[in-house]
């Protein structure tokens, strides 16, 4: 179905807003995803503060062409854009759905900190743990030497008694 010129302009304005307001953008390749699965995915993404927008590849390419450093990843098939002001949330959430719908959805690339990333790089970014988990890991690293010293002192005290 053909899109009117006015509708294309609206889509380009929306993509320009996404481009300027988002810290991270993930290009999502979706295929044969049922309406109920798509609705569930959109509502879950919305809860996490991640936007999801489907547009024609030509309009996406026109909106993002030259906007970021590097080379835009190859966009094959049907493409949607997942975006957020959180740098890692879109990639993490889409990766979660890739696990649920293996044959229907995939990460096709994206933009991270103003640089185009390919499929592999965006998948790697999606593997970064969430900030609370990273904080917990950091506290554990700090606590580990202290805990070792306490165990050693306790063993020494028990030996002396």
Image (cartoon, grey):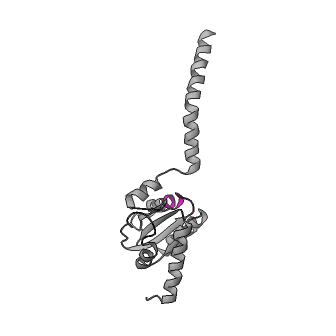
Where is residue 86 shown, x and y percent of the image? 56, 59
State which region is magenta.
Answer: 85-93
Q: In front: 29, or 158?
A: 29
Task: Look at 56% across and 37% down and name the residue there.
Answer: 140
* Foreground pick, 133 / 14: 14
The C terminus sits in image quarter = top right
The reply to whether residue 32 is visible in this rendering is no
Indicate left or right for 62 with 20 as reference.
left
Q: Residue at x 54, y 59 (%)?
A: 89
Return the x and y of residue 36 as percentages of the image width and height: 52, 73
Whether residue 26 is situated above or below residue 144 in the rendered picture: below
Residue 90 seen in this snapshot: yes
Residue 60 location (% of width, % of height): 44, 75
Query: Going by the image, does 84 lie left or right of 76?
Result: right
Q: Is residue 11 magenta?
A: no
Count of numbered marks = 0
Location of residue 135 by image quarter: top right
Rendered location of residue 159, percent (x, y): 59, 11
The part of the image, by quadrant, that contains residue 146 is top right
Q: Is residue 2 above or below residue 86?
A: below
Residue under the image location 48 percent in, 70 percent down: 81
Q: Vertically, is 7 above or below 152?
A: below
Quick one: 52 or 117, which is closer to the camera? 117
Q: For the view shown, which residue lies furthest in the right direction?
A: 161
Q: Indicate left or right for 15 with 69 as reference.
A: right
């Amino acid at each position: 179905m053909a899109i009117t010129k006015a509708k294309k302009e609206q889509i380009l304005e929306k993509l320009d807003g996404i481009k300027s307001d988002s810290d991270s953008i993930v290009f999502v390749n979706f295929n044969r995803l049922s309406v109920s699965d798509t609705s569930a995915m959109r509502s879950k993404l919305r809860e996490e503060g991640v936007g999801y927008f489907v547009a024609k590849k030509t309009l996406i390419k026109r909106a993002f062409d030259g906007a970021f450093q590097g080379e835009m990843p190859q966009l094959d098939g049907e493409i949607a854009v997942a975006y957020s002001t959180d740098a890692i949330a879109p990639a993490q959430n889409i990766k979660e759905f890739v696990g649920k719908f293996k044959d229907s959805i995939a990460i096709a690339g994206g933009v991270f900190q103003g640089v185009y990333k390919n499929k592999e790089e965006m998948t790697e970014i999606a593997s970064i743990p969430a900030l609370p988990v990273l904080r917990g890991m950091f506290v554990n690293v700090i606590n580990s030497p202290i805990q070792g010293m306490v165990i050693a002192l306790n063993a020494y005290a028990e030996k002396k008694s």
